[in-house]
Image: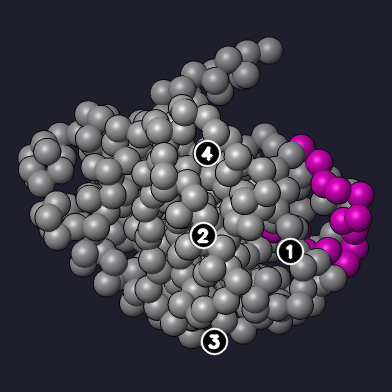
């Protein structure tokens, strides 16, 4: 089914596969837009990314990258208000692709009360209007995408903001990430047959089971992205976890509960160096592989950013192919739309 251009086109009505293929361009353009945000040079004591769903996942990736690239701590907040430690010396990045996410708008107002430095990132909506009204630096993204398909723009803009402020120098990592994702697209796009297409093959393997995506270090937030994309694009139940924590609790249930046979563990690997984490991964696979399916997906590239986004784009393709295998449009959002309609009723 996945190799039929006509059947795929009939299901993929909003061209999710096209959005995934454009991810490298989105990333590069997002960096440019973030640099143009208007934020004055300012090195904060901390960075706080505020957002929900597909707009917040860019913050998770940013946090993981900053852990190996900067001394400034970063956290991602998904709520209606900010923690008590956020204040004048904090840089608060409010990210909402639609510009109308109620939690993000509430955190924007809370950041103003705390007199934090604020940058807003959005395609428009209320967030754009509020930023203009109170003269908050603003990075404008193009409209017309689903929030989860705006990751390249969103992450690129966040990184551009931090470059402009003087927090980081990404040292051409974006350029390598763009090249690496171009290589991944050449392997994974719809025109490549299943027999030669790693994303299609992984989608077929995961079609009849519940995936648990396991990351560590740089791939920890990518595992969350995979699970979220499988939920939304793939219309499938999926979960994510991380090593080494997983080995201190969840592994017991996987080995002792016979229901684990309906699950599959997918390890997102990115470090070729031999060390304690590599030994742990091998041992964990051996233990859980006795009763459950185990798969590995390896990053490509040299820089942390390239490795991270090689795994991101592989997961995005896999999730879209899972949705298509289920006979679903990867872009549809009916349960989310229904919930929003219920919550909007006063």
Inter-mark Cα distance, 4 to 2: 13 Å
| CA neighbours of label 2 inside 10 A, class few (<14), some (14 to 19), many (20+) | few
| Front in this rendered view, residue 54 or 264 | 264
Residue 92 position, x and y percent, is 75, 58
Magenta stretch holds residue 253: no
Inter-mark Cα distance, 3 to 4: 44 Å
Judging by the rendered image, the residue that carries numbered circle 3 is 171
Inter-mark Cα distance, 1 to 4: 35 Å
Upstream in sequence: badge 1 or badge 3 = 1
Task: Name which residue lies at 58% across and 44% down.
Answer: 251
Q: Is residue 218 visible?
A: no
Upstream in sequence: badge 3 or badge 2 = 3
Q: Which mark is residue 255?
A: 4
Task: Specify the segment rendered in magenta.
Answer: 80-95
Inter-mark Cα distance, 1 to 3: 19 Å
11 over 132 or under it: above or below:
above
Query: Please, what secondary structure does the residue beneath circle 1 have?
Result: strand
Query: Please, what secondary structure does the residue beneath circle 3 have?
Result: loop
Inter-mark Cα distance, 1 to 2: 32 Å
Query: Please, what secondary structure does the residue beneath circle 4 have?
Result: helix
Judging by the rendered image, the residue that carries numbered circle 1 is 74
Q: Is residue 315 left or right of residue 56?
A: left
| Image quarter of residue 20 | bottom left
Magenta stretch prevailing secondary structure: loop
Residue 297 position, x and y percent, is 37, 60
Q: Are marks 3 and 2 in contact (CB under 8 Å)?
A: no
Q: Which mark is residue 283?
A: 2
Magenta stretch holds residue 83: yes
Tell which residue pokes out farthest to the bottom in this image.
Answer: 171
């Amino acid at each position: 089914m996945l190799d039929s251009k006509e059947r795929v086109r009939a299901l993929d009505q909003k061209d999710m596969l096209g959005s995934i293929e454009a991810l490298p361009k989105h990333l590069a353009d997002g960096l440019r837009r973030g640099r143009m945000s208007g934020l004055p040079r300012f090195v904060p004591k901390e960075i706080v990314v505020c957002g929900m769903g597909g707009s917040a996942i860019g913050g998770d990736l940013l946090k993981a990258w900053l852990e190996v690239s900067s001394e400034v701590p970063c956290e991602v907040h998904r709520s209606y208000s900010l923690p008590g430690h956020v204040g004048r010396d904090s840089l608060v990045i409010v990210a909402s692709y639609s510009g109308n996410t109620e939690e993000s708008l509430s955190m924007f107002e809370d950041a103003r009360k705390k007199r934090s430095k604020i940058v807003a990132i959005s395609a428009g909506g209320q967030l754009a209007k509020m930023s203009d009204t109170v003269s908050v630096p603003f990075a404008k993204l193009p409209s017309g995408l689903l929030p989860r398909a705006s990751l390249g723009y969103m992450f690129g803009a966040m990184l551009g903001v931090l470059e402009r402020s003087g927090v980081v120098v990404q040292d051409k990592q974006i350029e390598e990430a763009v090249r690496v994702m171009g290589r991944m697209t050449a392997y994974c796009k719809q025109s490549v047959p299943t027999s030669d297409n790693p994303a299609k093959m992984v989608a077929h393997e995961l079609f009849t089971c519940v995936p648990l995506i396991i990351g560590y270090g740089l791939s920890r937030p990518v595992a969350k992205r995979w699970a979220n994309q499988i939920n939304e694009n793939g219309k499938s139940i999926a979960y994510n976890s991380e090593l080494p924590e997983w080995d201190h609790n969840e592994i017991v249930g996987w080995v002792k509960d016979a229901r684990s046979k309906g699950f599959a563990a997918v390890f997102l690997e990115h470090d070729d160096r031999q060390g304690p984490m590599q030994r742990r991964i091998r041992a964990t696979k051996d233990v859980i592989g006795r009763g459950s399916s185990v798969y590995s997906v390896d990053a490509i590239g040299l820089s942390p950013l390239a490795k991270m986004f090689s795994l991101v784009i592989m997961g995005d393709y896999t999730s879209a192919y899972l949705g298509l295998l289920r006979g679903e449009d990867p872009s549809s959002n009916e349960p989310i739309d229904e919930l929003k309609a219920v919550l909007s009723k006063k």
